[in-house]
Image (cartoon, rainbow, N blue to C red):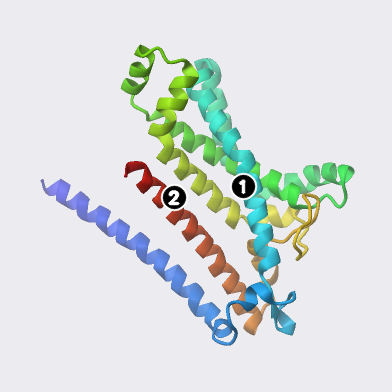
Amino acid sequence: MLIDTLTRWLLRAGAIVSALVMLLILAFLLIESWPVLDQITPTRFFTDTSWHPMEGAYNLMPMLSGTLLASVGALLLAIPLGIASALFIVFYAPIYFALPYKRLIELLAGIPSVVFGFWGLTTLVPLINQLHPPGASLLAAILVLTLMILPTITLTAYAALNAVPKEYLHGAAALGLSRWGMIYGVVFPAARSGIVAGIILAAGRAIGETMAVLMVAGNVVQHPEGLFDPIRTLAANIALEMAYAMGDHRAVLFVSGLLLMLLVMLLSAMAGKMENNQYA
C-alpha cells in the first residue's frame, strides 16, 4: 500500500514538473518576444512587405510557409511508408527478416540530424541539381525530413500494431476475414491512437528540425513556387541569425520560436481531440 501511494505521488510530481517546464519555456519565449510584441501589431508578422529586421520589416510568412510545406511534404511521404513498414514487420515479413529490418529502422532513428544534412548536402543536392538547379530546395528538405521522421512513424506504429490484443486477431480469423480485412477492419481501429501519436511526434520533429534543413534547403526567404525553389524555415532562420541579432531583431527571432511552439501545441491539441473522438 505504501509503495502504491509513493508511486502515485512520484508520478504526480513528474507530471507537474513536466507541465511547469512547458509553462516556463512558453513564459521565456513571451518575455523575450515582448519588446517587439509591445511595439507592433501581430498582424505585421504576416503582412509586412519582406523580412528585413534591420529596416523594421518583419514578415515571417515566407519562412512559415517553407516550414509547413517541408513538414507536410515529408509527412505525406513518411506516413504511408512508415505504416507500411510497420505492417510488413508485424504481419507479412518472416521472423528471420522482420527482426533485422526492425533493427535497421532503429539504427536509422539514431543517426544525428547533422549526418542526414551532410548526406543531403553532398549527395542529394547535387543529384537534384542535375535534374533542376539549384539543387538546394524544398524538394531536398522534404526528402531529408522524410528519412528523419520515417523511423519515428514506423516504430510507434509497430508498437501500436503489436499491442493489439491477440484475441481480436483470433476473432477476426474465426469470422473468416482475409489478412487485409483483419488489418483494415480490426487492427487499424484498435491501434489508431498509437499510430496518430507517432505521426504527431514525427510532425513535431519535422516542424522543429534545424540543422539538416538548413544544410539542404537553400535558405532563401521566399514563398516557393515549386519543389525546386530554395526555402528558409523558421528554425533555420533562428539558427542563422541569432548569433548577430540585437534589439528588435533578436526579439522577432523569439517570436519565431513562439510561433513554432504554438504550432506544436496545435498539433498536440489536434491529437487529443482525435483521441477523444475515438472514445466518444
Check disc 2 and report its element: helix, strand or loop.
helix
Residue that sits furthest to the left in the current view: 1
Q: Is residue 103 visible?
A: no
Pick whichever, 258 or 271, lies toward us.
271
When the figure is inspected, residue 190 is found, relative to residue 28, above or below; the finding is above
Could you tell whether 208 is left or right of 131 in the image?
left
Task: Report the Cα–Cα distance between label 1 and label 2.
Answer: 27 Å
Q: Residues within 10 Å of mark 1 (few under 14, many from 20)?
A: few
The amino acid beneath tag 2 is Ala
Question: What residue lies at 74% left-to-right and 46% top-to-bottom?
Answer: 120
Left or right side of 223 for 19: left
> In x, y percent, where is residue 2?
12, 49
- Mark closer to the observer (1, 2): 2
Give the residue type at disc 1.
Answer: Pro
The residue under the point 58% across, 87% down is 39
In this figure, which residue is indicated by the disc labeled 1? 112
Q: Which residue is mark 2?
A: 271
Instruction: Locate the C terminus by quadrant.
Output: top left
> Where 180 sits versus 19, above or below?
above
